[in-house]
Structure formats: structure tokens, C-alpha cells
Image: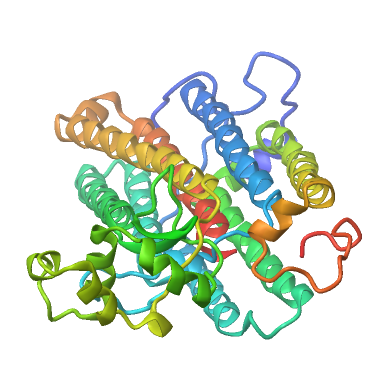
Amino acid sequence: MATAAATRTNWWSGGRSPFNVEYGKLMMWYFLMSDAFTFGAFLISYGTIRFSQNYWPNPNEVFNAFPGAGHANLPLAFVSLMTFILIMSSVTMVLAVHEGHHNNKKGVVKWLAWTIVGGFAFLACQAWEWAHLIGGEHVVLNGNQLEVWGQTTSHNPWGPKADTQLVATALQNSSHEALVSLVSSQHHEMGHAQLAAMPDDRLRSMINVAELHVNEPGPVAFGGYFYGITGFHGFHVFSGVIINIVMLIMTQKNVFEKRGHYLMIEKAGLYWHFVDLVWVFVFLCFYLI
Amino acid sequence: MEHHTESSEVTFHHEPSDNTKRIWKTFWILLIVTVVEVGLGLLLYSIEESIPGWLILFFKGMMVILTLAKAFYIVSIFMHLGDELRNMIMTIIVPLSLFIWFIGAFLWDGNYYRTMRNRYDPSMENKTLQQPPQQKADTATNPLY
């Protein structure tokens, strides 16, 4: 009924807001629009640099780990779980807003609490993913020697596949540390200390060059963009969790009950959904394509 | 239905829906679209070495379209933008259409930079291509791949 009346109203004749939206909510929308431009600029900058390179790492090879699954090749699995967590927390948030519309304090508290749990779960997943990437050990043919790199903002171990002949030559120039790491990647039964005590020649003889997965260095920009953009998104998730916690406390203290409406929950909800919205695009740009 | 007056800016109140059917329907749509996206991604991963470049682009384009569909459902249903007045929706959506130019212009520029470097700095191409090209094709006539 309100919709029918709304279409008949002359919104621009003055005396009322032509947007029929409360001030705070409208400003939240404009803030989110500006934030969308910020994220959009980041992602487009990433796309520009990616288009300017002849080679770009295949995300399926970079993001193929799952907590507790060891070295199993599971592309897209972990990030699908993260996406599911964020979509689920978006649903619990919209349910909290729904309960707010009905002035049901109990319902708001219940669904807000679940949203906060989802937010923390997502952050925990991201922390694991970052730690796994930074601490990863990947053999890289750098110049004429083999080195062991993790994925950082200055090193990218996911370049093109290195030539086997060059790898065999580089083996002779490689440091003791790199050799130990190479052997331990092929002989899981041997301890690190045990290998470190062996002479280089012994280590070299234990390496099966044909089965080594060695890459050349990849484009450095990959790490900067990945950590920069997922970090900025993660910061949004974190601040969203904080906002939701504040909302939960205010609800518990009957602030909204006394006020007579739960509009603040709606505004916090807009922010939280935006975080989910951005993730949809981060998921597309970094993991899918 | 009785409403609490929250502010003078709001002339007409939205009737809050009685049930959560719409929310759960949207959840299932988002979930199914995501599963399809992941399925496409895994399918592409398993066959991308053996299919032509345009087919890879087709797969990636499908994923972009599905992502835009997900974005529509999140904004329209979860953020309730679809329930707002047209006046207000337009002040959000119209500025965002700048992205159409933004994406096109910048990706074009990135591709142009790559083409120029490959043309005038041959070491660049040898260093960063998996296999040196058999015959030197001008990447400007065959962008994106």
C-alpha cells in the first residue's frame, strides 16, 4: 500500500526528502559508493598491471592448499569455504535487520552474534592463507642458482616453469640451505637437522632433478596486489566485526528498544553486506580468472 | 500497521515482510551461482592447456557475468536497494557506471604497454614468455592472448 502511495507522490514539490530515506542511511550509501570506487580503482590497477605482463601466475597453482590437507593439490577449495562463510554471515546479518524491522530484540541479538562469529571465522581463514603463502617454501631458479622463496611482496616464486637443463647446472651453484630444502621436499622422512649436517655433494646426489618443480621468478606485482587488496578487504571485515560488536552491546543495553527503532542495525548491515559484495569481486579477480 | 516515527525524512514506510522467505531464496541463488562459478573454474583448470584462447576468455567471461549477477542480488535484496525509491537508486547506480569506461580504458592501456615492450624490448619477451614465440606475431592484432 505504501508503494502505491509512494508512486503517486510528487517527490520534488518540496517539504519532504525526495529520497524517502533517513539521513544516516543515505550517507552510509554514499560512503559505500565512494568505497566501491576505492576498491574498484585497486582492482582495475591490478588488472592493468596484469595485462601489461606476458606471464601471470595461474591462481589455481598458487592457491591450492587447505588447512590440514598437507601438500594435496586442492585449487579453489579453501577460498570457496571462505566465500561460503562470508555469504552465510551476510544472510545472518540480513536476518538481524529483519528482526529489527519487527522490533524483536532477542532475534537481533541472536543473528548479530552469528554474524560476528562468521566475521571472525573469515578473518581466521585469511590469517591462515596469508601465513601459508608467506611461509611457503618454493624452489626458484634465480639467475644461475636455486633459491627457496615464499610468496611475499618482493618475491614471487610462481614464474614460468624453469628449463630442466638450467636447473641441473644451477644445482652446482646453490647454497647449502637451498639444497637442504630441496632434499627435504623429496625425502619427507628425513629431519631438517639431519640434512643440514650433510655435505653439499651428498645432498646433491639425493635430489631427483627430473622430479623437481622449479619455477623462474614471477611478476613481483602479484604479491603486492594480492596482499594489498585482500588486506584492505580484511581490514574492512575487521572493522565490520567491531561495528557489529558495538551494535550487539547497544542492543543488549536496550538503546534501540528505548529509541523505538533498529535503524542503526540497518546501517551496520549495509556496511557488512558491502564487505561481502567486495569479496565477490576479489574472489573473481584473484582466484577465478 | 503502526509505525514508530524515526525521522521527518521518511514520508512512506516500507512494510516489513512477515517472513524470511525472500532472504533464504536469495541465499540459495547466491550459493548455487557460487558453486557454478567454482565448477567453471575447476573445469577451466583441467582443460585450459588444451583449448584455444578464445574459449578460455569465454569461460572467464561467464564467471564475470555470474559475479555481476551475485552482486545484483546482494545489493538489491540483502541491502534492500531494490526497495528504495527510484530517485535514490539512481544517485547510487549512475555514478558507478563510470566503471564501464574506467575498466575499458585501463585494461586497454595495460595491454598497450605490454605490446610496446614486446615490440621494442625483445629481451622482455624472451625473459617472460614460457616458450619463445615461433614466429613473431604482433600482439596488437591479437590482444588479450
Q: Position of residue A136 (x, y in %)?
A: 30, 60
Which quarter of the rendered picture does the N terminus of chain B lie within? top left
Residue under the image location 37 percent in, 78 percent down: A73
Q: Is residue B25 visible?
A: no
Q: Position of residue A132 (x, y in %)?
A: 28, 58
Q: Residue lying furthest top in this view?
A: A15
Q: Is residue A61 above or below residue B126?
A: below
Taking depth in this image into account, of A91 and A232 the one nearest to the observer is A232
Residue under the image location 9 percent in, 65 percent down: A197
A121 sits to left or right of B70: left
Residue under the image location 70 percent in, 51 percent down: B124
Q: Is residue B76 visible?
A: yes
B144 sits to left or right of A168: right
Which quarter of the rendered picture does the C terminus of chain B lie within? bottom right
Q: Position of residue B25 (x, y in %)?
A: 48, 68
Q: Position of residue A74 (x, y in %)?
A: 38, 76
Residue A41, picture quadrant: top right
Q: Is residue A286 above or below residue B87?
A: below
Taking depth in this image into account, of A37 and A200 the one nearest to the observer is A200
Taking depth in this image into account, of A96 and B63 the one nearest to the observer is B63
Residue A157, picture quadrant: bottom left
Display colour scheme:
rainbow
B108 sits to left or right of A261: right
Q: Residue lying furthest right in this view?
A: B141
